[in-house]
Amino acid sequence: MSAARHSIGVEVRYAETDAMGIVHHSNYLVWFELARTHLCRQTGKDYAAIERDGHQLTVTRSDLRYRRPARYGDSVVVTAWIDDLASRRVRFGYEVQRTEDLLTTGTTEHIWIDRTGRPCRGPEALMPAFRRLAGIEESP
Amino acid sequence: MSAARHSIGVEVRYAETDAMGIVHHSNYLVWFELARTHLCRQTGKDYAAIERDGHQLTVTRSDLRYRRPARYGDSVVVTAWIDDLASRRVRFGYEVQRTEDLLTTGTTEHIWIDRTGRPCRGPEALMPAFRRLAGIEESP
Amino acid sequence: MSAARHSIGVEVRYAETDAMGIVHHSNYLVWFELARTHLCRQTGKDYAAIERDGHQLTVTRSDLRYRRPARYGDSVVVTAWIDDLASRRVRFGYEVQRTEDLLTTGTTEHIWIDRTGRPCRGPEALMPAFRRLAGIEESP
Amino acid sequence: MSAARHSIGVEVRYAETDAMGIVHHSNYLVWFELARTHLCRQTGKDYAAIERDGHQLTVTRSDLRYRRPARYGDSVVVTAWIDDLASRRVRFGYEVQRTEDLLTTGTTEHIWIDRTGRPCRGPEALMPAFRRLAGIEESP
């Protein structure tokens, strides 16, 4: 089994460009988050619902490589997948492509926190679905 | 009496520019808010504290005129004042200047809401200070 | 004849929300711009191409009314149309809706500028298409 | 010799917070850039002038660790320094602190590009100043 990949189309917004005429590098984190939201929705629960239930995935690290710039007028495809999964942590992987060109790659690492803001285990009701997304075979 | 004016210095951030090489017009609302926060702090309570007490000023209207663009490398001065004050509403006025040049002017209108999100009167503990800021003479 | 209306779907991004739990009011200008870009594309030329040809529509005014907030998890529809058209100016109108609810309305005013940044008449190659978009009958 | 460190004060803007009530993680890249701009100004040339001369530092990688969140009402100190310097590449290091608390650390890697967008050596007029900033002793 391999990890499920979820892709979304993103159209570059004028406000996302900067004076160099390219997408400002901070926006890729915003696009990553959008693709991650869609991926998490494949668990059958959307992220807004997970939050209302009192759990949040808070980001602890991000690592991005900018290979080629995106520009105004571009439509890109942003793909997210679960790269590594533990009981208290999740690492997501990402790619941004414009047709054949790979523009940006990256990872973000997250921990689960509860209503009080303290680190906790991932919600039990959700973990089997996360393991399936991650391509981890359940023990029989 | 006239309304108190509060000015802050803002340095243009690269991420605020767009592919036209100028500050994207959406950022002026962010700068206005920063100047408004400082102005409200003159009441002796900062806005974060007002929020913790259960009151929020939610924006209901904004009106901006963009006269000259700001660019990367510019330092600008953003000035805010209370333009109109009622028991349930506040209108703020704003100016953005680069040395002698007037770049942008605008107003934002706000209503007070309580913890439930319902419109309410401005908090009693705060209104005398708001009236002083607005330059409204208290009846003796 | 009436003005052509163009609608796009926009999914609220987490980064667009603020500590009040709602979409920060500066983001509506970004969504308006996205809908305006799509509307202008109906002229048969996309806005990136218009820019390469040396013309830009620079914003001179914006006026927004925020009626109900959008939240994370919401999908909204943003509609743009040409509200008023002159040889050197364009005013666009906008609406943001979440199913039946009207969340935000607004207008932005723009003037045409040339490569030197000076105000100019709208590009001749484009104006007939703009007049059609605006619902203005051409004289026979 | 050790690398010069440059610190700036940054006040959290409401628009930078998200529905979790904390600063959205994409904004740290914007703050890093602001501190980097100030650091580069210590070379005696500001970054806007370097750009006009035809050289740009384009970001190729970023790596951030988010330890504690910043919140609305916070004032933080963002520090930047040159972490590694080569003829064609620069790596900057960063720290964000709120009084005693270390909130975020990170690095960004950049390459020099010329007017055509091609990678090039750092501008000769600037490199001695960059080496001094980096704390690299010039050979006598």
Image (tube, coloured by chain):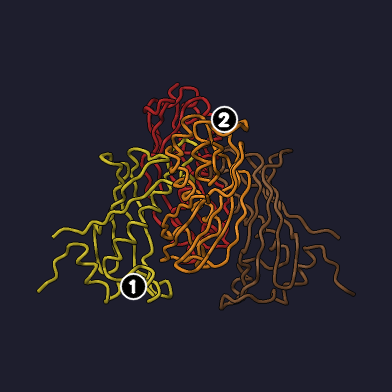
Chain colours: A brown, B yellow, C red, D orange
Callout 2: helix, strand or loop?
loop
Mark 2 belongs to which subunit?
D
Residue farthest to the front, as pictured? D140
Mark 1 belongs to which subunit?
B
Q: Which residue is mark 2?
A: D114
Q: Residues within 10 Å of mark 1 (few under 14, many from 20)?
A: some
Would residue B121 be found to the left or right of residue D3 on screen? left
Q: Can residue C104 be seen by looking at this rendering?
A: yes
Q: Residue A83 shows which numbered tag?
A: none
Q: Which residue is mark 1?
A: B120
- Could you tell me residue D39's position as x and y percent? 46, 47
Q: Residues within 10 Å of mark 2 (few under 14, many from 20)?
A: some
Callout 1: helix, strand or loop?
loop
Q: Report the residue at 46% width, 22% height from top.
A: C124
Indicate the quadrant containing the N terminus of chain A: top left, top right, bottom left or bottom right. bottom right
Would residue C5 be found to the left or right of residue A33 on screen? left
